[in-house]
Amino acid sequence: MTYSKEQLYRMARQALSTGDMRAAVFACREVNASYPDYFEGWGVASELHLKLKRPEAALMAAEKALDIRPSSTKALLQKVECWLSTDNKKDAATLLLELADKEYREVQIYDRLGMLFTQLDMHEQSLPQFQKASNLEPDNPAALYNLAACQRFNGDLVDAENTLDRMLIIKPSDHEGQAMRSSLRKQTVEHNHVEELQGILASSDMTDQGQVQVCYAMAKEFDDIDDVQNAYRYLAQGADIKRSRMRYDVQTDLDIIASIRDAYNHQIFQSGINGHSSKEPIFIIGLPRTGTTLVERVLGSHSDVYAAGELSNFSRELMRQVQVNYGEEKIPREELASCTTKMDFSRLGADYINSTRPLTGELPRFIDKLPFNFLYAGLIHLALPDAKIIHVTRHPMAACYAIYKQLFKDAYPYSYNQEDLGRYYIAYHQLMSHWNTVMPGVIYSLSYESVVADLESESRKLLNFCELPWEDQCLKFYESKQASTTASASQVRKPVYSSSVNRWRAYEDELQPLRAILEGAGIDVS
């Protein structure tokens, strides 16, 4: 049977939307072989290659589309997507800035421009794109949501709440919008959204995901107004639904952590470290919600330091080198840590530094604040022996409660069940003790409680460890205009406050299962 180019394009598009990669590959091959001058055929082929994680092939297809229509904004944006997939951020940013100077009539173009700027952590540039999208279609809920999210990242919290108010009038059942609005400020008895949220939760057409979002929003608002009983009830309800939808076994993570401890023993660190000599990186590690963002903002306010955010570059370069060394060989998870001990650590360090460009390099130092880099602290020291590693700690119960009450997007699956959380915390605690034993003095430990109690004293000691001269502006981190995309995006706009330090104690009865697990492992929770 002979298909027209339009039929093949529709077949490819339909197959992509349903995840039928085999059918999509067939349709793309047919349309591009039979109709090589068909613009849409090369465009959908580029999208397919990106889905299949073939960025070079995707770029070639995008170039073919541009050969047919050189000025196509759609194809140029696709080219940016391809460059981002190959870590070519410099060319991606240059082309995006050129495209952002033009005027368009389609919301989708402005929205995509904004999203791509966001991927590049260029949040100041993404904001006007989302604003233009919402101006074109003031009643478009998706456009308003994206604008509000960008305003939140940039610290425009009042504007973000106003935008969400507009959006939720149009689409009150939007659970993501409701959850974001609840997070923007501390709610009060006089001014909250509890009744509205309860009405939405009672709706019969709520999905599991929607229920989770609304339950966490309600838990947050009830906690804000000091209604502990209702706060925990909705928190547990949301966490239970979230956990029930996950295929996760915490024992897998515990086995991986144990294998890291076994593989990275005393001998490796005593055999001499010949890593890459860069002094640029400052790694902030630990668990999420323990004050890592606060420490990042303090350090990032220094004139010699760029806060690069939560980078996945180190683990990505690590796995890249493993693939080079072992090819297509499938390595069991429990053997992976042992395999990494045989790599070229100097090359790993150099590849990591290069992978952060051009985001980094304009200032003498940069911060990589990805909490779960605590798993790689030993590898980081071997690869970058002159890098600074800062471990932010928090009272065990306070840390676990803060993690439990946070709805994460795609990370930290152990956080939705007290037993999982307790067991993971123990493994983390044991690994950090191990790192301090096998490489004493390398990791600087800084407690969240100490920072809150005496910001200036702890900041001075922190800068001294990082070999940075003192600057008063580090104490005014909350005045920084730099965007924050972490769960703490709202809190970092305020001066240091102590109200959250012992908030977990209001939930001591509800957190007894967690406490018992930690105490059983000999962890002090007094």
Image (cartoon, rainbow, N blue to C red):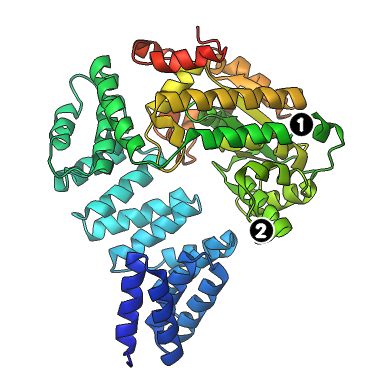
The outermost residue toward the right is: 271
In x, y percent, where is residue 496?
47, 20
Decide if residue 226 is in sight here.
no
Q: Name the amino acid type tagged 2.
A: Glu
Identify whether 391 is placed above or below 325: above
Alpha-carbon neighbours of circle 1 within 10 Å: few (<14), some, or many (≥20)? some
Give coordinates of residue 210: x percent, y percent. 25, 41
What kind of residue is marked 1? Asn
The one of 70 and 304 positioned closer to us in this rendering = 70
Question: Looking at the picture, how far across and down is residue 363, in whole percent?
Answer: 67, 44
**Dots 2, 1 in contact, CB < 8 A:** no
Label of residue 329 in the image: 2
Q: Nearer the viewer, mark 2 or mark 1?
A: 2
Q: Which residue is pictured at 42% across the width and 80% down the height? A: 26
* Residue occupying image coordinates x 43% and y 18%: 514
Under circle 1, the secondary element is: loop
| Residue at position x 81%, y 35% in the image | 268
